[in-house]
Amino acid sequence: MPEQENTYENVNLQPDIGFDVRFVTMHHNSPFHWHRELEILYILNGHATVTMDRERYEVRPLDAIVMDCARIHEVLYALPQTMGICIHISRQLMRRYLAEPEAVSVQCAGSRVTPEQRPYYTELRDYLKELTVLYVNQEKTYHLRSTALILNILACLIEHFGEPVAKAVSDAKAGSMERLEQICDYVEHHYAEEITLQEVADELGLSREYFCRFFKQNTGTSFVRYVNQVRINHIYQDLLYTDGSIQEITERHGFLNQKLFYRMFKERYECTPRELRNLAQESPQEQRGTLFRSGWNGITEK
């Protein structure tokens, strides 16, 4: 079963390339997380719900959304089938062409595009369509052509969707992100155990009250709820990829309150654990993958 990364995500891009393109599906929901790379999500079919900086965005077919570096976000892909491409672009690549990439914040979501930005958003989507076809077909010039498209995408985002950021604000954000990385790394290693607020606060050398306030201010959710969301995300993966009973899986991942688990699961995924398994069987990931491996390039406006 593939491992899921949580709140700090280590993307591990190849330094000589500086970007990564991959398919994402309903099988790869991601809880609240952040990373140092700029991320672009482009939906091909179905739809995704992205929560970013406490705001919710609906991303529909042939729409795109950008999660800027160090912005906390989560992505839920609609059932029974949603597919898109996810692009990560490293800071190192951006620094090759921009003196201070940290001084610009990219804000781009299809549902929030202004009339003035609309032509440039159309341009961005055209680049993403072309990149998707390149990624599917993997011709021998793929790396050359995809690098050119990534640079065009970056230029479009910086020129038409970039907003200036004061250095003091950028530095403060970086400090908060480092502390969040510590917190969430701790949770990822201990989520299956009983975790108390006090022990995590002690681990960071903070008071319990300051720790709770800091976490809520930076994620928009309470620490206890976040731990349960991490548990649910691991449970979600096991429901898809293993045959264990629901109770066995929930207990293995540290969620002992069954009533709370079912309520949070239904709230998050709009279905029960058993319904999730049934939906996944109706739309197997392998069949959807075959569509793309065969050279599909039928991206059309709807």
Image (spheres, rainbow, N blue to C red):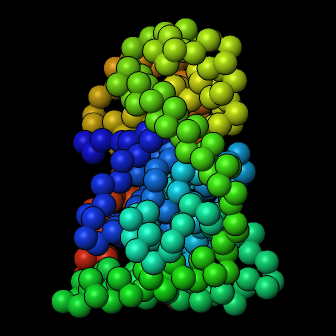
Res 67 quadrant in image: bottom right
Residue at left 72%, top 85%?
118
The foreground one among 86 and 214 is 214
How many numbered marks does the figure carry? Answer: 0
Res 282 quadrant in image: bottom left
The foreground one among 302 and 115 is 115
The answer to whether one can see residue 188 in this image is yes
Q: Is residue 164 left or right of residue 38?
A: right
Please, is residue 234 above or below residue 207 in the view? below
Res 119 quadrant in image: bottom right
The foreground one among 57 and 148 is 148
Q: Where is residue 73 in the image (x, y as percent from the top left)?
A: 58, 49
Q: Quadrant of the C terminus?
A: bottom right
Residue at left 49%, top 37%?
178
Q: Where is residue 275 in the image (x, y as percent from the top left)?
A: 49, 42
Q: Position of residue 196 (x, y in %)?
A: 52, 10
Please, is residue 6 above or below residue 129 in the view? above
Q: Which residue lies furthest to the right in this view?
A: 115
Q: Where is residue 40 in the image (x, y as percent from the top left)?
A: 51, 67
Residue at left 31%, top 80%?
136
Q: In which quarter of the image is the N terminus?
A: top left
Please, is residue 78 above or below residue 164 in the view? above
The foreground one among 75 and 202 is 202
The answer to whether one can see residue 246 in this image is no
Q: In this view, does 173 lie to the left or right of 235?
A: right
Q: Which residue lies furthest to the left in this view?
A: 140
Q: Is residue 135 left or right of residue 157?
A: left
Residue at left 52%, top 26%?
228
Please, is residue 291 above or below residue 56 in the view? below
Q: Is residue 299 left or right of residue 118?
A: left
